[in-house]
Image: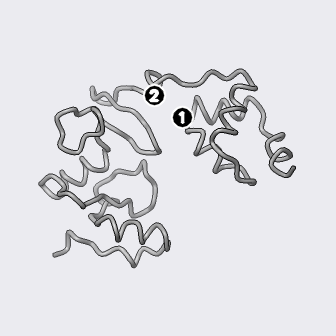
Amino acid sequence: MIKKMMLARINARWLKQKYHKEMLSCQEIAKLLITPVSRQTIYLKLKQFGINPRSKQDSIFYVDGERCKISQGYFWIWNPLHPRTNGSYVKRSVLNLEKKLGRFLKDGEFPHHIDNNRMNDAPENLELTDRANHARHHRIGYRKHIPRLDRR
């Protein structure tokens, strides 16, 4: 009942703004609501309001001549030959951290966004960590739990 009341406040203009203009995913839009809902619920609202789902082509754009996309809250750059490619794209945070370190990331090494903003891929905002410590940081929420592997 509460979910329906909160969902009733969503209007088509707001949803279209978030989905098409700000390029947020259904999951990200769901997290913006006071009452938690699933991404499927947001998708159904899109259909109810007659808002067409984005095609994969809609999310592809060019920045400084490079083919890019935004997915899962991350900025991805087309680079099919990179060793850490996901299909044909690699996260910009990975590329920027590799440039900062002067080498490719090894298996088990991951970039961490210091300010927790996935779109802020500035080299000074990225630090090297491993999977366990990265997960521990996000689970606990304290920055002090991330050892900086690049300080050896």
* Dot 1 and dot 2 residues touching (CB under 8 Å): yes
Residue 19: image x %, image y %? 60, 33
How packed mark 1 is, by other alpha carbons closer than 10 Å (few <14, some 14-19, many 20 or more), is some
How packed mark 2 is, by other alpha carbons closer than 10 Å (few <14, some 14-19, many 20 or more), is few
Q: Identify the residue under disc 2.
A: 59
Name the residue nearer the viewer: 53 or 151: 53
* Residue at horizontal 71 percent and vertical 49 percent from the top: 33
* Residue at horizontal 19 percent and vertical 52 percent from the top: 98
Residue 105, above or below 8: below
Mark 2 lies on a secondary structure that is helix
- Number of numbered markers: 2
Comes first in the chain, label 1 or label 2 = 1
* In this picture, residue 6 sits left or right of residue 123: right
* Residue at horizontal 58 percent and vertical 44 percent from the top: 27
Residue 2: image x %, image y %? 85, 52
Q: Identify the residue under disc 1.
A: 23
Residue 3, above or below 147: above
* Residue at horizontal 41 percent and vertical 66 percent from the top: 135
* Screen quadrant of the C terminus: bottom left
Residue 42, above or below 146: above
Name the residue nearer the viewer: 122 or 133: 133
Q: CA distance from mark 1 to mark 2?
A: 8 Å
Residue 73, above or below 115: above
Q: Amino acid at mark 2?
A: Ser
Q: Amino acid at mark 1?
A: Met
Residue 30: image x %, image y %? 65, 46
Mark 1 lies on a secondary structure that is loop
Name the residue nearer the viewer: 50 or 16: 50
